[in-house]
Image: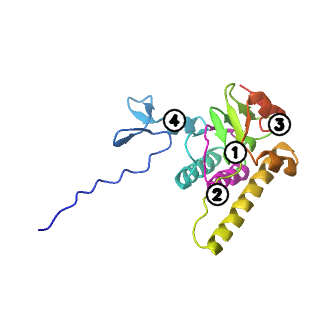
Amino acid sequence: MRTTRTTRARRPHAPPGAITSGPETVPVMVPDGRGGGEDVFGALARDRIVFLGTRIDEQVAAETCARLLQLESEDPEGEIRVWVNCVAGTQYCVTAILDTMEYVSCPVSTVALGCVAGPPVMLVAAGDKGKRYGMSSARIVLSQPLGGLAGTSIEVKIQATELNRNAKAQVGFIAKYTGRDADELEAMMARDTYMGVDEAIDFGLIDHAL
């Protein structure tokens, strides 16, 4: 006797800032002033604010890079404000955003809030000097990029080499933005290093507290 299998529809990828509750993804909506509503992140973009509040993966990176380029196209001299509350992200995706931030002609300010850890710390530190901020309760964590090793011994060796390259690249970016010695940073980032706003200012990751 033939049996049938019921398959559940695949849930679409949650848009940045969406609230997931139960089986459906609910975008955060705000009034648009015309009797309707719009995605809150679209509303923020009209004020030239980009908000990163979830793990930075390929989709988040693509949307963020596109938004930065769009804002530059609209006003090449207008400031873009990047708010970061993120404790995880693929290093390749984070550096894609980082490169785009450096590419656009617009001034870019950054704000750390909540907790920023791992590769996303580079985004906070990459803001224009004098325009890197931290909210009073923010925590910033310097740590090495994470990566799993699997496969044959040759594959594991290749992955380990790339993971080591990523760790050195992250140290290089932080050294560039803070003026700190790379060897000092490498030793610090061998273990998680937690900082409050004042410590992050003294370290050179940000410039001002909000």
| Residue assigned mark 2 | 92
Percent coordinates x, y for residue 36 in the rendering: 38, 32
Label located before the other in sequence (2 or 3)? 2
Q: Point out the image quarter for the C terminus.
A: top right
| CB within 8 Å, label 3 to label 1 | no
Residue sitting nearer the eye, 207 or 155: 155
Q: Which residues are magenta?
A: 76-103
- In this picture, residue 86 sits left or right of residue 105: left
| Residue assigned mark 1 | 123
Query: Of the residues shown, which amino acid type is indicated by label 1?
Result: Leu
Residue sitting nearer the eye, 104 or 73: 104
| CB within 8 Å, label 4 to label 1 | no
| CB within 8 Å, label 1 to label 2 | no
Distance (Cα) linking label 4 and label 1:
22 Å
Query: Of the residues shown, which amino acid type is indicated by label 3?
Result: Phe
Identify which residue is drawn at 37% across, 50% down.
11
* The quadrant where residue 21 appears: top left
Label located before the other in sequence (4 or 1)? 4
Is residue 205 one of those drawn in magenta? no
